[in-house]
Image: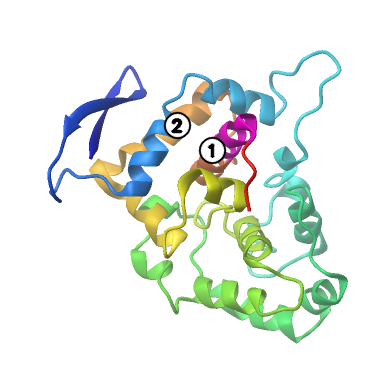
Amino acid sequence: MLTISMKDGVFMPSPTVVSGASDGALSPLGQRLRVLLGAEHVVGDLRRYFGIDLPPGGMPFTGSRFEHLAGGGDRPEVGDRFTAEDLVAVQTLSVTVPALVALDILEGRLGAQLSGLLHAVPKGIDMADADVSVLADGSPADQAWHLLCAQHGVNWVIAGKLLARKRPRLLPVYDRVVRCAVGRPPSFWLALHTALREDDAVLHRHLLRLRQAAGLPETVSALRVCDVAVWMNHRALGHACL
């Protein structure tokens, strides 16, 4: 197992081999993310994605509007219910909620059920600071995810992006590109929670430094910095992800 340290704010892989599990051992996802987020091009990737550094005639990625559209999905007056703006926001991430499901979310029983669950999901807290019970199987967030996945035409990617819009600091965007880059842990939420908290939350703090270095506003969560950095890197490599 590789141990990874920090040098001048950048993650540096070390060839030291750690035998077996120990208090200092990193989780597989933690190791993978430290390598990806330690790349020299990460800050440039973030700036390109959010439209800070663009070539002449270039356009920012539509996903740069995901968290900011209509003031954000987690603002107090709408934080516990899905709005039409939320449905448009997920389209900036290249997914679409089927029309019948969208109507049920906005006007029907499904929307009422989701609102009840969202009300029980903490607001204004980073995943790294949240108790694991908030993300565990059977939690209100997990129930909301399963409820969305049970709808015709809604898969795990769409469900995750909808919930990330409502709790951008707590629940991550996770799609096929990111899954291809970092693997398929039994629970991505729990694996990411572990990775962000281990080693005195060094990964979480590094994400905040990357956000600052890229000149991004604080409304872009650490989770979103992670998602965009991993997505941009893997997309550039041209992998075909299923």
* CB atoms of marks 2 and 1 within 8 Å: yes
Compared to residue 186, the image places residue 172 above or below, namely: above
Say which mark, if any, is on residue 89: none
Residue at the image point whose x is 69% and y is 64% from the top: 78
Compared to residue 170, the image places residue 32 above or below, namely: above
For label 2, the SS is: helix
Viewer-proximal residue among 222 and 48: 48
Q: Predominant secondary structure in magenta?
A: helix
Q: Amino acid at mark 2?
A: Leu
Viewer-proximal residue among 72 and 56: 56
Residue range corresponding to the magenta coloring: 228-238
Queried whether the magenta region covers residue 177, the answer comes back as no
Percent from the top left, x then y, of residue 95? 76, 56
Residue at the image point whose x is 59% and y is 20% from the top: 44
Residue at the image point whose x is 45% and y is 35% from the top: 207
Say which mark, if any, is on residue 230: 1
Q: Amino acid at mark 1?
A: Val
Q: Is residue 162 left or right of residue 144?
A: right
